[in-house]
Image (cartoon, grey):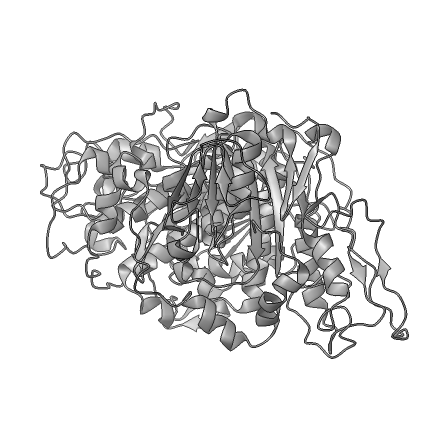
Amino acid sequence: MGTGRSWNGWRSHLTMVVGCLTGLVAVIWWGRAPAPDLVPKHSSPQFDTAISSLEKEPRRAPAPDLVPKHSGPQFDTAISSLEEPRRGASSASSGFLETKEPEEAPPPEAESTTAALGSLQPCKASYRDPSSRPGRPCLPQVSEWPYKSNTASRTQLGERAWMAATGKVAEVECGGWHLFGDMTWCKRALSSTAGSEQKDGAVIGLSYGIEQRDLWSEIVSNDYKVPTRLYDCFQNPKDSPPLGREDLQKASCAGAPGHCYETRYQSHRICLGGAGADIPGQRKYESLRLHLKDRQRLSVHLKIDTEGSEWEELEWLLSSPKDLDKIRTLDMEVHLGWRVESTSESRKRLSNEARIARDIETLERLGQYFRCTGSSMEVLAEEWMGQPNGGRCKPQSCGEPLAHTATGFPVIQFAISWVHPALLASAPMALAPNTKPKPAPKPALSGPPAPAALSGPESPPTWSCKRSFTDASSRPGRPCLPTPAEWPYKTKLKSPAKLGERAVAAAMGEVTEKQCHKWHLFGDMTWCMKAFSHSDPSALIGLSYGIEQRDLWSERVSQLFKIRTRLYDCYQRPEDSTPLGGRAINASGACTEEGPPCYEAPYEPYTICLGPESRLLESRRFESLQLHLRNRKRLSVHLKIDVEGSEWEVLEWLLSSPEIDKIRTLDMEVHLGFLSGSGKDFARSSMKSKDRIAYDIDILERLRQVLTCTGSSLEVLAEGWMNDGEGGKCGGRCQQPEAHAAGGFPMTQFAISLEFRPPTTCEAVPF
């Protein structure tokens, strides 16, 4: 990214993406071939001081799989610890996973080891409601470690679950909270049908797992007048009036002693899961796909409490953005790692730890699309503190849960609530209450479709707009992309253009030069000068991931703005990279653009790569962005990422974390669909190439909700592509890329620049 490559400089990458996919997987999945002299020589200061012992601890053998029995604890009943169910529930009838002690029980880590972990950060509980609560779960801390062991991987899983359950919505965005049982409801989302694109403008509630009584559907019906559909195939209808088809609908439920619905409801002896198959035991299962089939955008309130059958349905939902967009709110009881009779064989074959990790990743991905309003973690942790097999356990005497926070609280089962971000007052197109919105306009295409009748070879290309810049660099504003006179590809499928146009929209600059005071355009960067100005440059830092032989990004940050930088690359040979080898001019005077690598502010090099988690991989040190943002203040980090495909899992985490508020600017080289060695243990790596590209574009779109785009390299790359015999002049001989703009320009690799988004789109850039 830092060298400002032209189209010809990138053509080899694009050829690899649209060419032989087998070669792509072989080269990128396993990373570049390790050289024996590239073992990292040192780690970063954060790694040494924060969680080094957690990372160095050897992995334990996974606990043996046990099939949890489907007992059906109440959705509004609080969870149990792994060793002792809460509120007198029998452990024999609960679906918890068996825990097994590690072969070696290490002593608890010192406080300094986990000081960087989120649940250990000082906080004060803001609510006293005996229910799910908004915001960050403030977990009490035990005075002495209660478990016989303290396994690093189990703490890491628990901290990820804690982060996923951290509410990220302010009360003012919701117009108030409605808190009860396991729900943290955003009133704005429930008090009207605004935004629903159903033909009649109505919404419905789908409730899976109702047992004897379903307070969720009753309150949705009685307080918000939403009709509901109830599903449960395990509950005996004789013990469940709504499932037994009793007529419980009344004109008013005020003062009613038992089950009561003011709005019509339907009940079905059907369970969620199994893709519509009949599972042994004569129970009927139906998929979420089937039940959402006739619903439109923002027309469904969804509740899932299905004792472990939720995960594969949620994985399907995450693969279908159109169906995700139908959900207004999602309330769910989480059962990490559970498996039931409808669980697929592939999931059953996973170890307990692998299932838990996969489920947490599903929560993290849901948090990228929806906004978490709150969870039951805080109130459950308060109760856990008083349990003899929980917080009151004798020091180092209880069995360690398979996933727990750094405070010790087990996270295997809890409740969580989400809301669609379009329903919040802070949304760019926030909907006025009690109004039916006009249909959202379709995004403008970057260029007209290729003509049906092909023009002659000498016909000039058409451009979708007038180009305002001629700089051979990244450019602000809307990318002006061409359409060749002759369609360059053998085929003309619609889906690649749809994917590509989404990427074009995500890369569309929306900041004006007036807001920025001035542009600084060079290489792959579109810099807003106002974002880089600061009265005290020492309060800022630049983090550059993927520097190769020379990193012009960090040099320019240092020379123009006197901002100190940290440089990271574990694939580049320090012998061939002056800055990585520590040989660049370092804060010792003025620099010249034509000279050797030179920094006017101090820089620090590290033979470390950016990854989703901190670990050694094939003798290379990877560290997480979470670690490197530790102790940074709000809007104090200029960030550059050019890591050949390992950015996506990192960005997933960033979007789920309040740490994103620390980012002042983000310059990134986008690698849609690329695979990397650091991400091979994550779900994205098992996706088909087309699905990965769609997944990555979704991440770009989510980034745009938090950060605002200043510009991209699309326009200048398209100019080079137009004159390429393997590009715009291919004349129908080339393979169609998996994602391209309407005019044919491939969208698999480009650069984009973003900066902190003001609270409202009308404000000037707040620097």
Residue 246 or 725: which is nearer the viewer?
725
**Which part of the image, by quadrant, shows the C terminus?**
top right
Residue at 81% in and 58% down:
447
Measuring from the top left, give residue 509's x and y in whole percent.
Answer: 70, 42
- Residue at the limit of the structure toward the top, as seen here: 535
700 lies left or right of 490: left
Measuring from the top left, give residue 554's x and y in whole percent.
Answer: 51, 41
698 lies left or right of 52: right
Residue at 49% in and 66% down:
687
Residue 102 or 639: which is nearer the viewer?
639
Measuring from the top left, give residue 565's x and y in whole percent.
Answer: 45, 37
On the question of residue 309 being in view, the answer is: no
On the question of residue 467 being in view, the answer is: yes
Residue 759 or 601: which is nearer the viewer?
601
335 lies left or right of 444: left
Query: Which quarter of the figure has residue 438?
Result: top right
Residue at 78% in and 48% down:
470
Measuring from the top left, give residue 579's x and y in whole percent.
Answer: 43, 46
Name above or below for residue 664 compared with residue 349.
above
Name above or below for residue 150 compared with residue 374.
below
Residue at 51% in and 61% down:
316
State the count of labels.
Answer: 0
Query: Which quarter of the figure has residue 397?
Result: top left
